[in-house]
Image (tube, rainbow, N blue to C red):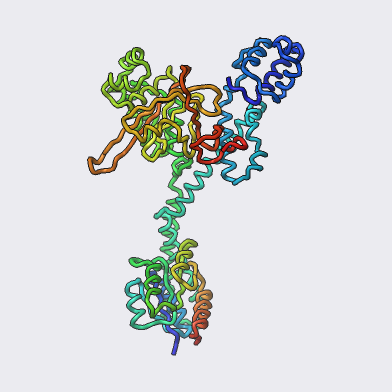
Amino acid sequence: MPLSALTGTKLRDLRLAQGLKQADAAQRAGISASYLNLIEHNRRKVTPEVLERLADALAIDRAALADGGNAALIEDLRAVAARGAAQAELSRADLARAEVARVEDFVDRFPGWARLLVALETRTLSLERAVEALNDRMTHDPHLSASLHELLSSLSAVRATAAILAETPDLEPEWAARFHHNLHQDSERLAAGAEALVGFLDAGRGIEEQGIATPQEEVEDWLRSRGWAISDTELATGLGAEIAQLASAVARSLAADLVARGRADAQAMPEDAFSTALASLGPDPMALAEFFGISPLAVMRRLAGVADLQAGLVTCDASGTMTFRKPAAGFPLPRFGSACPLWPLYAALGRPMQAVEARVQMAGQGDRRHRVIAWAETRHPHGLRGPELREASMLILPDDGSGPIRPVGSSCRVCVQVDCPARREPSILFEGVR
Amino acid sequence: MAAHVLLIEDEPNIAEAIRFLLSRDGLRVSYAAEGAAALVLLRQDPPDLVILDHMLPGMSGLEVLTALRADPGSRDLPVMMLTARGRDREMAEQAGADRFMTKPFSNAEILAEVRAMLAQAGRAR
């Protein structure tokens, strides 16, 4: 069981809620009152055995003392702190002031504030992206730049010509006529240019269209809202109406590709046949791939859609960029930046057509374990002499089996793994974690 | 002899206004609407000052400037650039422009700048 810094505080709260005296609770648990006092004030780490006795003494569920409930929120807050630190280039001393080490305490005491903080951070990120998108548009949009140039050119001509007409004493009539003609011409051009510009800016492109959420995130949000499941019947319909609701054209295209792929997977492995095979073979992508005569990547996608398995799935391309993310409980996937290089996903990426299986434990997620299976394939969509593409997927299954455990993380900055040989940058979470 | 200004500007009405303005001020103005023709003119009838638009069809203002600076005959020729945007200005500065006028400029500004540049080059009227 993960023993957070807060276990003591919780114990104290639970004891007080029952109106039990410290000495009585200690006696029931068979420990000294002063030891319990230290535990309750989070000054002593409590061993699992003692905790069990204390839980029994208070007649509470041991799980109630664990901090699993807010794990996602805690992870998000750590990410907020990591980003904040990176943005402001805070020194370690400043970070200590951000009290990252007490994040669990914070979440436990002020869950509402914690959620608000995460929501605000998400909003900040969206707005930053929108500003970037708008900035890009202002700077690089060829139409806008041409419109503005046209406006400035005609305006320059108008200004120069009008000034000559107004300021030149004794202007010859031929010149005056000529400049009046030019002025008329340029003011027409100016009007047309202004109209075109207003039309362009008014085109009613929504803010989403301008890139507030990345298309990938939009698709993930959509899938999350569906519980990450699309039935074969739904796949067959193509889900056109739902996809049309997505804000950006890129997201709609990504979603349509995803559904098309899902439909092909469903045709090769229909629901009934798949659940029968799954029941007899287990969630073994290699065995199922063999059984259906299909790529293990397709099997993994299919497995990720089986609700009972609670499986997560990440897919990346040859650059290691994640192209699909379905998180699993206790296995947070970084939303931004690079993931943990120790993920078997990357081992598989370097060794296509060789299955990599590992029992892993995500740092900072207590003793929760996962069994991950990774597989990569190469493709040559343009034939022999075209570029080689790679795709790797890692299926993340909850695991309670035994065997050697490999520690992995989510992303370096929010990872608590000490002495990690693969660390790229220091963690913000603890002093001394290198 | 009157100082000689070469104006390279593709907008005919802007060119006409500037030509009028400078001629009235006693300068000799020759004019080209695009870069290649301007470079020919530059060699045939070397000016004392060049006014160069940034956005030209075909050869861009920057390309003209680069070509002009690469030629020993015009390496030190004073060049005023007519620009629209800040970023253009940075690039023009690196390419060797001496002064800038941002569109829409005022006639008085242009005149004052041209006089100052000619004076600096020892071509005061």
Q: Quadrant of the C terminus of chain A?
A: top right
Q: List x then y, in percent, for residue A214.
A: 45, 39
Q: Nearer the viewer, residue A200 or A40?
A: A40
Q: Residue at x 40, y 58 (%)?
A: A146
* Left or right of residue A42, residue B9 in this image: left
* Left or right of residue A35, residue A144 in this image: left
Label tally: 0
Q: Residue at x 49, y 67 (%)?
A: B102
Location of residue A104 (image quadrant) = top right
Q: Nearer the viewer, residue A137 or A419?
A: A419
Instruction: Answer above or below: position of B111 versus A384.
Output: below
Q: Is residue A289 visible?
A: yes
* Left or right of residue A271, residue A210 in this image: right
Q: Residue at x 71, y 14 (%)?
A: A31
Q: List x then y, in percent, for residue A270.
A: 30, 19
Q: Residue furthest left?
A: A384
Q: Quadrant of the N terminus of chain A?
A: top right
Q: Residue furthest bottom?
A: B1
Q: Nearer the viewer, residue B34 or A366?
A: A366
Instruction: Answer above or below: position of A120 versus A42.
Output: below
Q: List x then y, in percent, for residue A292.
A: 27, 20
Q: List x then y, in percent, for residue A188.
A: 42, 63
Q: Nearer the viewer, residue A252 or B21?
A: A252
Q: Is residue A120 visible?
A: no
Location of residue A78 (image quadrant) = top right
Q: Residue at x 42, y 18 (%)?
A: A309
